[in-house]
Image (spheres, helix red, strand yellow):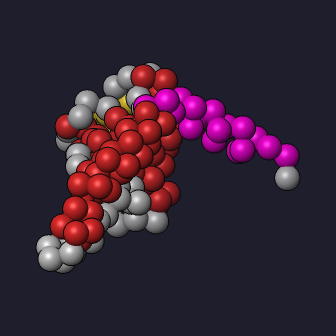
Amino acid sequence: MHISTKCSVAIHCLIFIYEYGEKQKVTSELLALSTGINPVTIRNIISSLKKDGIISVKFGTGGTTLNCRPDEVTLYHICKAIEPAFSSKLIGIHSLPSQLCPIGKNIHNVLDCSYEKIRNDLCQSLESITLGNIISDYHRIEHKPD
């Protein structure tokens, strides 16, 4: 199963934008320092989030802000914005089973039945978790005594 690390980076960026976007100008360079990811990759992620309407980016002076409340953005929404075809890539199926074998020629259809249920269950789970939930987890962990 695979959800791209870009989704985790996007969530990291969104938490950062939520925490600091009102207080300072959040740029791709600043997000790159926080995430440890190349600024070009950050700009691509920011562009995807902007296209999907999750964030706004000020032209010229720069700076990024959330367009909605964190509890209005689900993990599914974020993953879909970053990797539009992520759900179809969650579980791989070997590509060249023998068409001469009764199992080989039917295995894709057989697995599709079970794998579709897994995909649906995962998507429902992703829909049930919001950016607000994750920010709450961040605050709880950040303020936890050592």
Q: Where's residue 67, x and y in %?
A: 34, 25
140 part of magenta stretch: yes
Residue 22: where, in percent of width, then height? 46, 30
Vertical comparison of 132 with 104: above or below = above
Question: Is residue 120 something one can see in this rendering?
Answer: yes
User: Where's residue 53, x and y in %?
Assistant: 25, 30
Residue pushed farthest front? Answer: 102
Say whether residue 4 is left or right of residue 129. left
Picture residue at 49% right of the left edge, 57% below the top = 34
Residue farthest to the right, as pictured? 146
Q: How many marks?
A: 0
> Residue at position x 71%, y 44% from top?
142
Residue 117 belongs to magenta span: no
Which image quarter holds the N terminus?
bottom left
Q: Is residue 129 left or right of residue 57?
A: right
Q: Can you give x and y, in whole percent of width and height, for residue 88 in the image?
A: 26, 51
**Front residue of 32 and 117:** 117
* Secondary structure that dominates the magenta span: helix
**From this viewpoint, is residue 6 visible?**
no
The image quadrant that residue 65 belongs to is: top left
Q: Nearer the viewer, residue 82 or 94?
A: 94
Q: Is residue 102 left or right of residue 3?
A: left
Residue located 23% across and 54% down the image: 109
Q: Quadrant of residue 62?
A: top left
Asked if 121 appears above or below 73 in the picture, the reply is: below
Q: Nearer the viewer, residue 6 or 2?
A: 2
Q: Residue at x 27, y 63 (%)?
A: 107
* Front in this rendered view, residue 26 or 56: 56
Q: Which residues are magenta?
A: 127-145
